[in-house]
Each structure stands twice: as C-alpha cells, then as structure tokens.
C-alpha cells in the first residue's frame, strides 16, 4: 500500500524530480520515475501520452506492461480512448473498470490494450503548459475500483512535476525534426559533408535550447518546491528532521541540473570566444577533479580567431572539451597545455598532456577519440592523435584553413 503521510509524499515527489534530472529522452524519463510514482499511485501500467503535429496525433511512452500503445509512433487523437482528456473536454478521467466503461469504448477507438491487459482501474490527468495540454499522464491497474479522487489529486501533482521535463524534450524533438528535414534538403544541394555539418549545428542549438528550457522551467519549479518545504518546516507542519533528507536531495538535484544546463549551453564561447571558453573549461575541469594538475592555455592567434565561423568555433571547442575531459579523467597527468596558433592561414589547435598515453587508456576513451575525429571531419579539419613530447602522454592536434566568417559555406570545399 502506498504511504500517503505528508513527509513520505514529499520525499517521493522530490525523488521524482531528482531522478528526472539528466534524462534526455522520453522513454528513459518515464522509466526512471516509475518506481517513485508507484509509491504514490500503485499501477500495473504507466504511460505519458505526448501530443504531436499540432495536437492531431500522439505518441505513448510507457513502462510496466508493454502494450500496442507504445508501438505506435503518431497515432490519431480521434481514435485514442482518452481523446476527451487530450482535447480538453474533461479535466480528468477516473474509472473503476475501463473494460466496461463506455467512455473508453466508441466506434474506431484503439482500446485493444485495455481488454488484452485487463486494465480495469484507470486514472488520467492532463499535463499543461500555460494552459495548453501537451500530454497526459495515465496510471492503470488490473484491480477494479482501486483509484479514488485522492489518486486524481496525487496524479495532478506528479503531472506538474513531469510537465517541465516533457515540455523541454518535446520542444527539442520537434525542433530537431525540423532541423533534420532542413538538413536533408541542404545535403541534396550542397553535398553530404556540408549537410552533416549543418546537422551538427542544429543539434548544438537544440542542446542549448534544452538547457534554457530546463533553466527557465524545471529549475524554477524545483526552487518553488524548496521554498514550500522551508515554509512547512518553519510552520511546524512537518518536523524539520523529517524534511532534512528531502531538502538535501533536492539541493543535490538542483546542483546536478545546473551542471547539465552549463554543459548544454557554452555561454562563455558565445560571449568571449574560443580561447576564453577553452581556458574556462580547462580551469573548471581541473578544479573539479581535485587533482594537482598544472595547466596552461597559449593563444598565439593575435586576434585571428575573430574570423572563425561560429559552427567551426563550436566544433573546435567540443574537440578541446573532449580531449581535456579524457586527459583529466583517464590519463592521470601532472600537466595539460592547450595551444592555439595561426600560421600561413592555417589554424591549429593542440592539446597535450603528460599522462599515461592514449594506448594505455584506449579502453576508456575509444568513443571520445571517435567523437574528436568525427567533429574534425565535419569541419574539413585534419586531426592527429598520438604520443606527446618525448613519447610521453597524448597530443591531439586539429588544423584547418582559417576561412573568414562572412564567406559562403560552399567555399569551404575549395579552401
């Protein structure tokens, strides 16, 4: 039986927020919180039904029992058993036995999973952003007559916690789908390499957009929950010692979320340029590691980076970020040096460490090396990864012609 004591409920609500942090796709998000939701609303089947294509279609992301609902990518809303909720005709749906409830059984209804899985008790609530329905939360049980209006109220609170995350994920997915369509058109006109470069740029924008959505909505929601718990503690409604673990978990969640936002949006790169962004990441990575690593950034470009195309700057920053992270996490170096220089119209980025060397850490960073090479290929750069000075450590070198930012992208092929 679920524990509906106030302190226990708040603990489970905070657990939902904590588990959602860092989940960047619908399925992992709903599956990560299923157990916590079960403590609040017991269920045999749980799903979030997300509206797409201007609300005319929907896609269900489920956990618990696997049903045909989860296999349909873009089912018409008019055939959904909960169409009245998705369209806003009702504010909730509560049923003691959906197998015999006429609201779920109408001509053309896709109700097969209800009968096949014996989903009798059902509770459904909308998920709204600024009054508009973007999705619906559904809990179902094979036990008839299980849910009451209390469960409707609890489901609404859970839906409010899930909504900011699912809104951000839905916005990113919709924008990414549009970006992919645009990329396909450009690839036909300008070639596969340029199309892949544009895709990388679009994905970077979506990464930043997710960061902004998480900051503007999710982080604000968590802050409001923290303040509410503080008021409850001061008001004596719940003993402070009962709230302290929940508050500590919430603060950890907020700290993790801020780190995700920082990783998603390289604002230093946008505001101050490539050299400053790399220096900032190098300093922060080494400080966070706690290791006694000496570091230096040597900028020999004499202002030449101002002519760097934005998408090339982002790619070079991500390459440096990957190489620095690999060195700090896996190579055990005592020093890391990053050098930027321009010679004869050629821009070169070098990251050198004196650690264990790439051959001894390949089991850890094979994927990282592939990422570096792929990003270099997308900007038509030459990339070499090998031993550092004196055959010690690792040297990552990326070089490409420096093209003026105002040049037409098609000129890159002939640079």
Image (cartoon, rainbow, N blue to C red):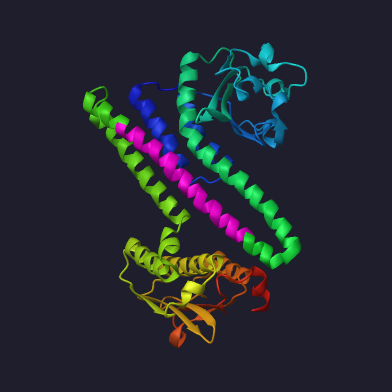
Nearest to the observer: residue 16 or residue 284: 284
User: Looking at the rendering, in which quadrant would you find the N terminus?
Assistant: top left
Spot occupied by residue 291 in the image (x, y as percentages of width and height)? 32, 67
Task: Please give the name of the residue rendered at 23% of the width and 24% of the height, measured from the top-left corner.
Answer: 235
380 relative to 28, above or below:
below
Left or right: residue 400 compared with residue 190:
left
Nearest to the observer: residue 122 or residue 54: 54
Task: Please give the name of the residue rendered at 43% of the width and 37% of the height, measured from the top-left corner.
Answer: 17
Spot occupied by residue 155 in the image (x, y as percentages of width and height)? 49, 24
Which residue is the extreme one toward the front?
A: 406
14 relative to 372, above or below:
above
Nearest to the observer: residue 303 or residue 351: 303
**Image quadrant where residue 402 sits:** bottom right
- Which stretch appears magenta? 199-227
289 relative to 214, above or below:
below
Task: Please give the name of the residue rendered at 73% of the width and 24% of the height, measured from the top-left corner.
Answer: 110
148 relative to 264, above or below:
above
Whether residue 191 appears in this view of the structure is: no
């Amino acid at each position: 039986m679920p524990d509906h004591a106030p302190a226990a409920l708040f603990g489970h609500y905070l657990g939902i927020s904590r588990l959602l942090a860092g989940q960047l796709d619908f399925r992992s998000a709903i599956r990560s919180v299923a157990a916590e939701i079960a403590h609040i609303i017991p269920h045999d089947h749980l799903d979030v039904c997300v509206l797409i294509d201007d609300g005319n279609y929907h896609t269900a992301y489920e956990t618990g029992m696997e049903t045909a609902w989860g296999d349909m990518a873009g089912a018409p809303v008019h055939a959904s058993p909960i169409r009245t909720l998705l369209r806003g005709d009702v504010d909730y749906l509560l049923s003691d036995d959906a197998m015999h409830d006429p609201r779920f059984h109408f001509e053309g209804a896709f109700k097969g999973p209800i009968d096949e899985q014996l989903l009798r008790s059902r509770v459904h609530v909308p998920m709204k952003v600024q009054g508009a329905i973007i999705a619906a939360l559904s809990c179902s049980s094979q036990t008839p007559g299980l849910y009451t209006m209390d469960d409707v109220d609890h489901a609404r609170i859970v839906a409010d916690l899930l909504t900011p995350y699912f809104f951000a994920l839905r916005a990113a997915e919709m924008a990414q789908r549009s970006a992919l369509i645009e990329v396909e058109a450009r690839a036909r006109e300008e070639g596969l390499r340029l199309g892949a470069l544009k895709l990388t740029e679009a994905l970077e924008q979506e990464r930043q957009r997710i960061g902004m959505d998480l900051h503007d909505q999710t982080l604000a929601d968590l802050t409001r929950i923290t303040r509410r718990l503080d008021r409850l503690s001061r008001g004596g409604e719940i003993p402070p010692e009962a709230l302290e673990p929940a508050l500590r978990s919430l603060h950890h969640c907020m700290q993790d979320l801020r780190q995700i936002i920082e990783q998603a949006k390289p604002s230093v790169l946008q505001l101050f340029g490539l050299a400053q962004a790399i220096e900032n990441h190098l300093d922060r990575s080494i400080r966070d590691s706690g290791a006694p690593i000496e570091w230096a950034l040597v900028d020999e470009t004499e202002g030449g980076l101002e002519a760097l195309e934005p998408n090339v700057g982002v790619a070079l920053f991500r390459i440096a970020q990957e190489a620095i992270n690999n060195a700090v996490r896996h190579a055990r170096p005592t020093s890391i040096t990053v050098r930027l220089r321009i010679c004869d119209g050629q821009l070169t980025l070098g990251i050198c460490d004196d650690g264990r060397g790439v051959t001894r850490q390949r089991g850890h960073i094979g994927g990282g090396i592939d990422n570096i090479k792929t990003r270099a290929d997308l900007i038509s750069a030459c990339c070499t990864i090998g031993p550092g000075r004196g055959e010690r450590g690792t040297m990552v070198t990326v070089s490409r012609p420096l093209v003026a930012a105002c040049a037409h992208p098609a000129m890159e092929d002939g640079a």
